[in-house]
Amino acid sequence: MPELRRDPVVGRWVIIAVERAKRPQDVAPIENAHTTAEGERNCPFCPGREDQTPPEIMAYRPAESPPNSPDWTVRVVPNKYPALQIEGELDARAEGIYDRMNGIGAHEVIIETPDHNATLATMPLQQLEAMLHAFVDRAADLEKDTRFKYIQIFKNVGEAAGASLEHPHCQLIATPVVPKRIAEELAGGLAHFGYKQRCIFCDTLRQEYDDGARLVFADDLIVSFVPYASRFPFEIQVMPRRHVSSFKNVAEEEVKHLANHIKLVMGKVDGVLRTPPYNLVLHTAPCGMDELEHYHWHIEIIPKLAKVAGFEWGTGFYINPTVPEQVAECLRTHRTD
Ligand SMILES: [Zn+2]
Ligand SMILES: [Zn+2]
Ligand SMILES: [Zn+2]
């Protein structure tokens, strides 16, 4: 019989097709997210084409190297087609029962590496660490702007996951409201804390670490696991074992371990699923809320393997055609070297 599982944070139910479940290794991606010669030829993010992006906001480069020249290791530029605009005052008002505000925000592109053909799995660890440092630096800078309530860092890889450019990059959008997904996680965390006086994420981590059935990889600082109520095949969460609500307060040792986790986990995902399109999102505390007892930063990795259909749209229930424990075992035993 299929099984219903409930996500302990947001209370979302998922249908796990236990008996009819596909073997994890039989799940096929919608497409393979490979780079192409044409993509590289026309790439505005490759070194030497710095004039094809808006002027950089920040870059890691040698002291003598001028802005917007090559020689960078990570480069952050404004999005050429921003979803939200940086200039202006926030103006929020009601329109009868409706609410509106002007589209103030920041939309930046974090170019992770000069190497067009690198992936999170193939990048050197140092490069991944530099990318993570850029997340911290940009978040810390943007949080000073009191118009922003949340900073969402995310990555789309492959057309099916919403990427329009191949070159390895993440995006950052600072929003003038706390997004609904985050508000739901905060509310779930607060409710759990309200009657247990413990962080739901810390509790989850402890259980996953002790149980082991859904672990992908764990070390003394970070745990990567397949969530109990995964919505999608090969959904993975990566979390620090230390309770920290805001990613910008990540410790240097944690950055090193996190880089290792991302490389290893993505190596397994790319190996098993043959370089699928995927989204990666960083969930962190809203701006100005650095020390929440009930929230815990984490990364969610979601390979794009199936389209979201009518039942999901209609109900918010998801049907997962794989069993999380089997997915975890498949990833755990897949060797990347
Ligand atoms: Zn490129
Ligand atoms: Zn916690
Ligand atoms: Zn989350």
Image (cartoon, rainbow, N blue to C red):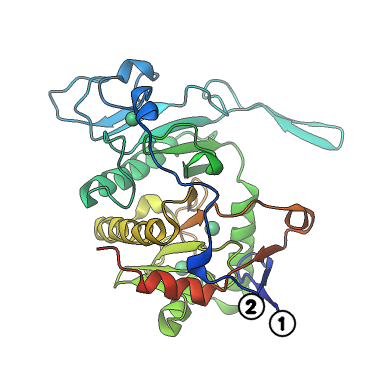
Task: Look at the image and tell me whether residue 294 can be seen.
Answer: no
Q: Residue 228 carries which label?
A: none
Q: Do labels 1 and 2 touch, CB within 8 Å?
A: yes
State left or right for residue 160 relative to residue 202. right
Q: In which quarter of the image is the C terminus?
A: bottom left
Whether label 1 lies within 8 Å of ligand 3 gets the answer no
Amino acid at dot 1: Met
Q: What element carries label 2?
A: loop
Amino acid at dot 2: Val
Residue ID at (32%, 47%):
132
Residue ID at (61%, 63%):
231
Quadrant housing residue 118: top left
Q: Residue 18 carries which label?
A: 2
Determine the residue located farthest toward the right in the rendered image.
96
Residue ID at (50%, 54%):
303
Determine the residue located farthest toward the top in the rendered image.
51
Q: Is mark 1 on a helix, strand or loop?
A: loop
Q: Residues within 10 Å of mark 2 (few under 14, many from 20)?
A: some
Determine the residue located farthest toward the bottom in the rendered image.
211
Q: Position of residue 277 (x, y in %)?
A: 48, 47
Q: Name the residue under label 1.
A: 1
How many numbered marks are there?
A: 2
State left or right for residue 257 relative to residue 323. left
